[in-house]
Image (cartoon, rainbow, N blue to C red):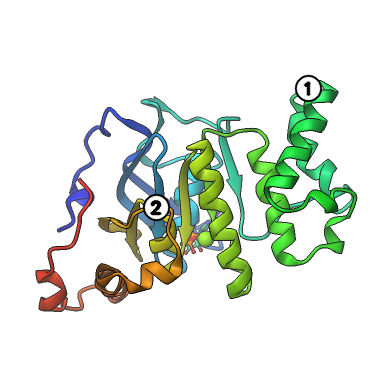
Amino acid sequence: MNKLRSDSSAAPASARISLQGVSKRFAGPSGQGAGHLVLDQVSLSLAAGEFVCLLGPSGCGKSTVLNLLSGFERADQGRVQLDGRPITGPGAERGMVFQQPTLFPWLSVADNVAFGPRMAGWPRDRLQAETRRLLAQVGLADFGAHFPWQLSGGMRQRAALARAWILQPEILLMDEPFGALDAQTRLAMQELLTRIWQQERTTVLFVTHDVDEALFLADRVLIMSTRPGRIEEDLAVPFERPRTFEDLVAEPDYGRLKRRILKALRHGEAGAAPRDADTEAQPLPRAA
Ligand SMILES: Nc1ncnc2c1ncn2[C@@H]1O[C@H](COP(=O)(O)OP(=O)(O)O)[C@@H](O)[C@H]1O
Ligand SMILES: [Mg+2]
């Protein structure tokens, strides 16, 4: 069952990014004592171009996994690697998108999107052309001169996406980026993200606690348990692309997969709650 949990050996050769046997402990509020174990022997890897969702209850360590891969945090134990080499800090090949769009309030939308490339010293022509292209891609062509406070939440998140995307990161680490959006805007953002991902073939690790979101977006879903965070399940999502929610919910496997994930989440939260025999018996796809 928990194949990945016990497997802390080398990541597959095809891995672009990986955690191998990673443990992470955080000190308590006073900084005293041994602290608490947040991640316990977590192993996961993403192949180039893969879209993987990391699903788990609040506080299970999802953001910590992203922070390790982005290079903001260091593991206490185990290996965190990019193309087989240790990750020691942030890098331009890895882009981050957070739950709250982190735009500079004093810059226009276009200047926010252009900020990274400007820092990287792009020539003016390329900077302007790419900013225009990205704003159009996320449906903000007419809003470049607006300021973030003049946009809706969904528009701000689209601007944040454009800002991450303009640098053409090979790997995108996304931390519940659509969690604060209303259902309809979220759906539009999910469609936009899969469309851009299919064009650019970026490798995406997308954190969410929403099962439907994971099934719509992912090639593979990793389910985390909590206290300490572990990978409970690694499930392939077999649905063809491009996907629409209307088609997905009509798939017989959709309900079965969703049910299985919900049970794994409940199991991960409750600790040792027994699993239901009938979902265990289903021949659902499992990632290798
Ligand atoms: N920098 C930190 N210092 C101390 N504790 C932290 C820190 N970051 C996260 N934690 C703790 O680690 C646990 C997992 O946090 P996090 O990775 O943010 O979970 P998730 O993203 O799944 O909600 C939580 O108990 C949180 O309080
Ligand atoms: Mg988090």
Mark 1: secondary structure: loop
Mark 2: secondary structure: loop
Residue 154 lies, with reference to residue 165, above or below; the image says below
Residue appearing at x 50%, y 30% in the figure: 88
Foreground pick, 170 / 143: 143
Mark before the other along the chain sequence, 1 or 2 = 1
- Amino acid type of the residue that numbered disc 1 sits on in the rendered structure: Gly
Q: Position of residue 32 (x, y in %)?
A: 49, 58
Q: Position of residue 112 (x, y in %)?
A: 80, 44
Q: Position of residue 204 (x, y in %)?
A: 47, 45
Residue 83 visible at all: yes
Question: Ligand 2 near label 2 (Cβ, under 8 Å)?
Answer: no
Q: Position of residue 108 (x, y in %)?
A: 88, 48
Which label was assigned to residue 121?
A: 1
Q: Which residue is mark 2?
A: 241
Foreground pick, 259 / 222: 259
**In this image, 172 relative to 233: left or right?**
right
Residue 34 visible at all: no
Foreground pick, 229 / 120: 120
Q: Quadrant of residue 123?
A: top right
Residue appearing at x 10%, y 77% in the figure: 277
Q: Quadrant of residue 233?
A: bottom left
